[in-house]
Image (cartoon, rainbow, N blue to C red):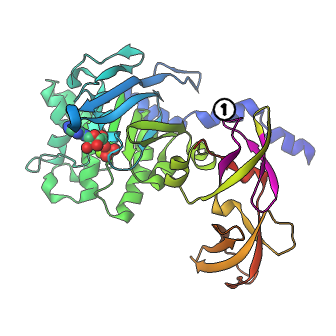
Amino acid sequence: MITISAAFAEPESIVSERKSAQPLAFRAFRDTLFGPSETETGGKRLAKAAVEARHVTKAFGDGPERVLALDNVSVEIRENEFFTLLGPSGCGKTTLLRLIAGFDHPTNGSILLNGEDISHLPPFKRPVNTVFQSYALFPHMSVADNIGFGLEMQGKPKAEVAKAVDDMLRLVRMEELKNRKTSQISGGQQQRVALARALAPHPKVLLLDEPLSALDLKLRKEMQIELKRLQNETGITFVFVTHDQEEALTMSDRIAVMSAGHILQVGSPREIYDRPSERFVANFIGDTNLMEVEVVSVSNGRARLRFASGAETEADMPEGMSEAKSVTVVVRPEHAQLAGTGDNGVLSGQLENVVYFGTDTHYHVRLDEGVLFTVRAQNVRGGAEERQPGARTDIVFSELAVQVLRD
Ligand SMILES: Nc1ncnc2c1ncn2[C@@H]1O[C@H](COP(=O)(O)OP(=O)(O)O)[C@@H](O)[C@H]1O
Ligand SMILES: [Mg+2]
């Protein structure tokens, strides 16, 4: 037995390398369409900044009407990355995209592409293309003519345009509708045409400004998968804008969470969800239990924390907060469990509300210190009987579930 499994075992390095490389078929297809990427050597991808914003400020208007749409924003977006700008309406997402595209210019700071300052370049000289929320297609023109429009404008030879259009039709799976007018195809199909048109000139970076928001839920889910596939197959850097946290979590390699002209945190979906750096990020993404806790001691960046219940735990302390006497911590509802009373729970209280969701059940517990705490439990067939409102309960969670916020 041991010999057989050893024959299949692979060194850790090979496994992790394969994970980061794209499947061969995808890469071959991409290379025919876009040519091999220079940074891809021996199947290893180097993390190089494709787009960089350096201390970018953008102000609109003057005097009392002045709006600071972006306030000293710095961010690096890597080559081949599916990067998402996530934040509520008005936080500056579109403004940042427009600066990258060149439709507008920073008040201060600079935009770099592959390490070169492109702040002075007009939009058509940047290897960047945009998919707008309104697809902005020409309704009286065919699908094929819409896709080829940009290339025609660039004065490319007819045969070259025709081939690029066919490649793009194949890429977005629209070959059959090639000659249809875009006024005679569905919203989802229009979205594909808009994508194909933006991809046809082989941009290095594709900017997508809430491209799915006009679609109904089912179509939206389909297009999410479609977009991921397109990004994988083309290897183009995608900068995607959304206000939908679930969309951001499921699609992105990394997410920048924005609020009021600032980028608050950049990280993988898991980092953003499990380790939110501050209250806004914790609240904006997923459900949260927030609690004020006492700081008992801090040593080497680890804090000993005491809950109002008297229970103690340890957690990492954000930099520069070692002097704090109390901090806010977040615990996700699915990272906590109900326990019997006297089970030595971290918290205790009374069950106030039980909400059944099919896949899971949410328990709202009024803690003895008066705060409401939610526990989310996955429902399993033949699982324990649901607890009834009014019952006393303890709540338990591991110290790994506790994240200190930099308020
Ligand atoms: N051309 C403009 N003139 C004045 N204010 C603007 C202009 N464009 C954007 N803003 C303001 O800048 C802020 C950020 O806008 P925007 O980047 O469109 O946000 P988002 O795309 O995140 O919804 C908002 O307060 C918006 O009203
Ligand atoms: Mg916007």
Asked if the magenta segment contains residue 307, the reply would be: yes
Say left or right for 398 vs 390.
right
Q: Is residue 206 visible?
A: yes
| Residue bearing mark 1 | 319
User: What SS does tag 1 mark?
Assistant: loop
Q: Residue at x 64, y 58 (%)?
A: 332
In the rendered image, the quadrant that contains the C terminus is top right
Query: Viewer-proximal residue, 174 or 56?
Result: 56
> In the image, is residue 295 part of the stretch drawn in magenta?
no
In front here: 206 or 292? 292
Q: Quadrant of ligand 2?
A: top left
Is residue 41 or residue 56 the one in the foreground?
56
The image position of residue 12, as x and y in percent, is 76, 33
Which region shows up in magenta?
303-329
User: What amino acid is found at the position of numbered circle 1 in the picture?
Assistant: Glu
Q: What is the crowding at mark 1: few (fewer than 14 residues within 10 Å), some, or many (at least 20)?
A: few
Relative to 136, 257 lies left or right: right
Task: Identify the residue shown where x is 40% and y is 50%.
Answer: 226
Does residue 383 appear anywhere in the picture?
A: no
Q: Is residue 364 above or below residue 261?
A: below
Vertical placement of 313 versus 84: above or below?
Answer: below
At 32% from the left edge and 55% from the top edge, which residue is drawn? 213
- Residue 181: x, y in percent? 13, 52
Q: Is residue 175 left or right of residue 80?
A: left
Instruction: Tell me what residue is drawn at x 52 percent, y 47 percent.
Output: 281
- Residue 207 location in percent, x, y? 33, 36
